[in-house]
Image (spheres, helix red, strand yellow):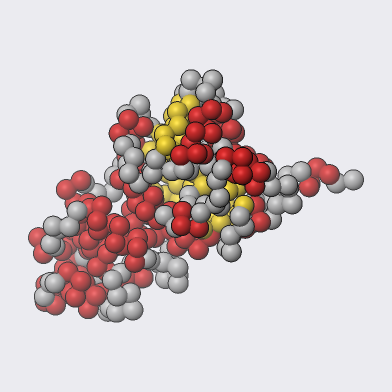
């Protein structure tokens, strides 16, 4: 008999385990909303693999985004962590979680939208490990906000729609490579990843998911003063990905062709290349070469939001 193999499904395989999500959602009076991209993980073994990827240790502070029915939360709380903050947008699910963890002094449930929540208190205690099965329709915006807090994040283990995950970890020259790839890689190193089949969720999505394990760089790759200019440069470079840098940068930034050529020369970048051929380090050099030519009136968050939306 090979029962042991069946009890440990592969992360990429579709689960044959009974979905407990449907009756639990019904009991909470919740119907999964497409507008929120709600797809609940129903396979405990995969939840275990996600939690294991975070390498939780005594004293860790953990932030979970979108805990839903608490499948990840239960396994996180089984470790000797210092604290667990769960931010859940659905008030009925948040109330249910608050009741479940009422006796755990380490746990705190925040009912609200992560994109609008006050995160200062969450990150005030020191480095935080961030985890979550992110809603497919707002995952890029959530990632963008986490980039702004990368200096106080120790590790992030996040689940995305598979296509989004592939774009985040894509390298120059690949068809998936985009502004989203560069923006993420300016802040985080992709440590590892694994696929999760669509059959492991309720309701079942049309596509698979992908878990990314991401670690912030030990030191920031650019200063706070440079950040807005760097993000604006990346956005401009990918604004017309089929055009050469000479053309895409000039049109997006409103800088004369002569100045664009001069900046590309200072960065030792061929003006005939397209943005998809440049790595994050190349685009960082380009932003510095553009220097005073950049118009950086746009706020950093707005620039990053637009880039992620266009990616």
**Which quadrant is the C terminus positioned in?**
bottom left
Which one is in front, 259 or 213?
Answer: 213
Q: Is residue 89 above or below residue 97?
A: below
Residue at image coords 19%, 75%: 251
Q: Nearer the viewer, residue 282 or 305?
A: 305
Query: Could you say where residue 2 lies in the image, as x and y percent from the top left?
Result: 85, 46
Task: Residue 196 in the image: state x and y as whole percent.
Answer: 61, 54
- Front one among 165 and 114: 114
Quadrant location of the N terminus in the rendered image: top right
Which quadrant of the view contains residue 13? bottom right
Q: Give residue 172's quadrant in the image.
A: bottom left
Relative to 27, say whether 78 is above or below. Answer: above
Q: Considering only vertical position in the picture, is 152 above or below 190?
A: above
Query: Percent x, y for residue 102?
Result: 52, 23
Residue 257 in percent (x, y) is at 14, 77
Q: Residue at x 50, y 39 (%)?
A: 92
């Amino acid at each position: 008999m090979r029962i042991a193999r069946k009890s440990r499904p592969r992360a990429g395989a579709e689960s044959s385990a009974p979905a407990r999500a449907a009756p639990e959602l019904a009991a909470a009076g919740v119907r999964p909303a497409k507008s929120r991209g709600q797809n609940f993980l129903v396979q405990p073994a995969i939840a275990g693999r996600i939690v294991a990827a975070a390498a939780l240790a005594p004293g860790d502070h953990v932030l979970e985004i979108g805990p839903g029915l608490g499948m990840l939360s239960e396994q996180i709380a089984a470790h000797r962590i210092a604290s667990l903050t769960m931010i859940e947008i659905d008030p009925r699910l948040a109330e249910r979680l608050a009741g479940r963890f009422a006796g755990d002094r380490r746990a705190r449930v925040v009912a609200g939208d992560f994109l609008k929540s006050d995160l200062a208190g969450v990150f005030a205690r020191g480095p935080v490990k961030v985890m979550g099965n992110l809603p497919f329709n707002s995952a890029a915006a959530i990632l963008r906000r986490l980039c702004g807090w990368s200096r106080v994040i120790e590790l992030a283990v996040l689940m995305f729609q598979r296509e989004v995950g592939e774009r985040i970890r894509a390298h120059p020259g690949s068809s998936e490579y985009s502004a989203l790839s560069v923006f993420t890689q300016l802040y985080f190193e992709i440590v590892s990843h694994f696929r999760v089949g669509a059959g492991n969720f309720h309701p079942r999505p049309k596509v698979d998911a992908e878990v990314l394990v991401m670690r912030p760089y030990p030191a920031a790759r650019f200063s706070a003063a440079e950040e807005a200019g760097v993000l604006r440069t990346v956005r401009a470079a990918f604004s017309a990905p089929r055009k050469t840098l000479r053309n895409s940068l000039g049109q997006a930034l409103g800088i004369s062709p002569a100045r664009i050529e001069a900046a590309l020369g200072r960065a030792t970048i061929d003006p005939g290349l397209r943005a998809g051929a440049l790595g994050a380090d190349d685009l960082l050099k380009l932003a510095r070469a553009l220097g005073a030519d950049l118009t950086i009136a746009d706020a950093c968050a707005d620039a990053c939001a637009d880039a992620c939306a266009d990616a």
